[in-house]
Amino acid sequence: MTDHRFQDKRMDKRSQVFISKKMSYALRHNPAKYGLTLDKYGYVDLHQFLAAMNRVHHFHPRLTEMTIREIMHGAKKQRFKIKNGQICALYGHSIPGIIKHPEKVPPAVLYHGTARRFLPSIWQKGLLPMGRQYVHLSADQATARQVGQRRDQKPAILVVDAAAASRDGIKFYYANDQVWLVDQLPAKYLRLLSASR
């Protein structure tokens, strides 16, 4: 069935978000649904990806590389990368073993936005990936708050002592300017900044 939301040449924001979510699902969580196989770095041939997306979702007009680049250019966060005729999602994978990010020394402080109801578990167990490949940390408070608001309108913002954690041997991985990743993070490196206003 044709999705007529995409008939306007210039996409509205809702259409861009819709396409971005479908791309994320295919590249982060369920490439098999689209008949795609990601390499060990999470990349897949861009033409195969476009053909699969159009086959499954019946975009009209058809999803093109230009459309994807328009979405990437207009996004606040870098979610995708196109390189050498291939495309990948930069982070957020739930598929084991996909995506190898460069290990880097983090900024002294990072942030994590979360629903307040998760705090008791976090204080007990620390930050865990919870079905994803990594724990996601934000470079600034605003991004952390935005992430936390997906599950709580007034999220808790945790301050991460990344400098101390790194000194103690915890590995940090660079995803992009806004997102850092860790395998897990003990609670001793966390403190509560505030609840969102």
Image (spheres, helix red, strand yellow):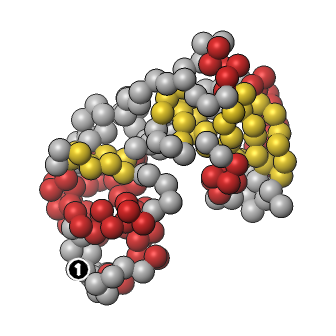
Point out the image quarter for the N terminus.
bottom left
Quarter of the image that includes the C terminus: bottom right
Measuring from the top left, give residue 123's x and y in whole percent: 80, 31
Give the residue displayed 42% in from the left and 51% down from the top: 79
Q: What residue sits 49% from the left and 55% below the top?
A: 77
Q: Which residue is mark 1?
A: 61
User: Looking at the image, is 134 positioned above or below residue 82?
Assistant: above
Tell me the SS state at disc 1.
loop
**Residue 30 seen by the camera:** no
Report x, y in % for residue 35: 21, 51
Q: Nearer the viewer, residue 54 or 189?
A: 189
Residues 80 and 121: in front is 80
User: Would you say 100 lies left or right of 83 here?
Assistant: right
| Amino acid at the residue labelled 1 | Pro
**Position in image of residue 9 (x %, y %):** 28, 84
Instruction: State whether residue 161 appears in this view.
Output: yes
**Circle count:** 1
Q: Relative to residue 15, is residue 115 depicted above or below?
A: above
Residue under the image location 75 percent in, 62 percent down: 153
> Is residue 10 placed above or below 121 in the rendered structure?
below
Answer with left or right where residue 188 lies relative to residue 51. Answer: right
**Which residue is located at x 50 percent, y 60 percent?**
76
The answer to which quarter of the image holds residue 17 is bottom left
Q: Residue 193 in the image: x percent, y percent?
A: 82, 43
- Asked where in the image residue 4 lies, by quadrant, the reply is bottom left
| Left or right of 53 on screen, residue 187 | right
189 to the left or right of 32:
right
